[in-house]
Image: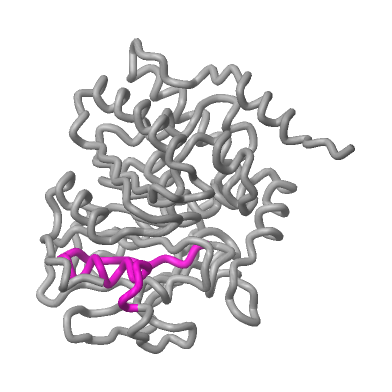
Amino acid sequence: MVYNPLELRKHQFETLPMPLAYSGGDPAAWRQRAKEKIAELLAMPVEKPEDDEFTVEWTREHENCREIRFHFKSEPYARVPAHLLIPRGGLNLPLVICLQGHSTGMHLSLGRNLEGEEDESVKNSPHAYALQCVERGMAALTVELRGFGENGGLPEDRNPNCRLLSGSALLVGRTLQGERVWDITRTIDVITDHLKEFDEGFDPQRIAVMGVSGGGITCFYSAIVDTRIAAAMPAACFCTYKDSIGLISHCTCNHIPHTAEYFDMGDLAGLIAPRPLVIVNGNRDRIFPLEGAVKQFAKTKEIYADLSAGGKCVHVIAEGGHDFYPLPAWDAFMAVTGWGHKIEPDESS
């Protein structure tokens, strides 16, 4: 006979007390307790370097934007590479930090292949997030997350290398997801500190984060932790814990110990309120099933309504699987934020 140990895990998920799940009452008091707990569980770094060693590597002019490649020190021994795209003539534009998921890295957001060359198939794919921002009149910043691409991806092909990093993080009292969130908060520190070096091409009061799949998870937690993030669009990453990363095989970098003991994703999404939030799901996503996503969004919507911000959260449900859906997603994002400008379907990738 073959036994299924996941039956035990399913029972455990169904009987968790979740003392910090939202249950109405005083949302302000609940938010304070819940935010403190998720910050604790993320186990982020706490030491900022004395010198961020911000370095502009090069600047290039393109037909529709200026591109600045730079890197900085996030914490001792940790560096973050990034590309900033500012649409031509841009001044004080909204800025969207774009995060790839499990892939060969941020080059996809820029419409390039692994060698850094422009690639039409990549430019026209759903994954060219930074180019999609520029098309809509917003500045874009790509950041390479730890374990992906140039920032710890496998040396032979830059494929994701999360298993070692996530496991070793747990041994030293951290989480890889917490380190990625830290890198986003440090990115905001650095770009605002060096705003003049970017010719004030973006507005530090209008910084958003978007990401898909693994990048969506980092987007999600970053927006919870850092209130300087004015809007968030996590995609292909939202569901119940039980129905997604709890009982379906995922990369361990998505797991934060003890999280499901206290709350579910719908509760945590409510910590982003009253800031604009667009959650994107495909209706045939097999690893973040729609039924669980709909259930959790109902909880998020309740929290937003109780904070008089019901119109600030949107659930985009697209026809398809585990992916990003640029047209409906960006249209919803621009509608809820009032940023950028809409483009016609035949102009979009």
* Residue that appears at 64% across and 74% down: 154
Q: Report the front residue among 152 and 16.
A: 16
Q: Is residue 229 visible?
A: no
| Residue 250, x across and y down, in percent | 61, 51
> In the picture, residue 138 is in which quadrant?
bottom left
| Residue 189, x across and y down, in percent | 36, 55
The quadrant in which the C terminus is found is bottom left
| Residue 301, x across and y down, in percent | 30, 28
Horizontal side of residue 167 vs 17, given as left or right = right
The quadrant in which the N terminus is found is top right
- Queried whether the magenta region covers residue 139, the answer comes back as yes
* Residue that appears at 18% across and 33% down: 311
**Vertical position of residue 116 compared to residue 328: above or below:** below
> In the picture, residue 99 is in which quadrant?
bottom left
> In the picture, residue 146 is in which quadrant?
bottom right
**Vertical position of residue 76 compared to residue 159: above or below:** above
Q: Residue furthest top?
A: 25
Horizontal side of residue 317 vs 88, given as left or right = right
Magenta region: 123-145
| Residue 329, x across and y down, in percent | 26, 54
* Residue that appears at 41% across and 45% down: 220
**Vertical position of residue 295 compared to residue 160: above or below:** above
Q: Is residue 343 visible?
A: yes
Q: Residue furthest right?
A: 1
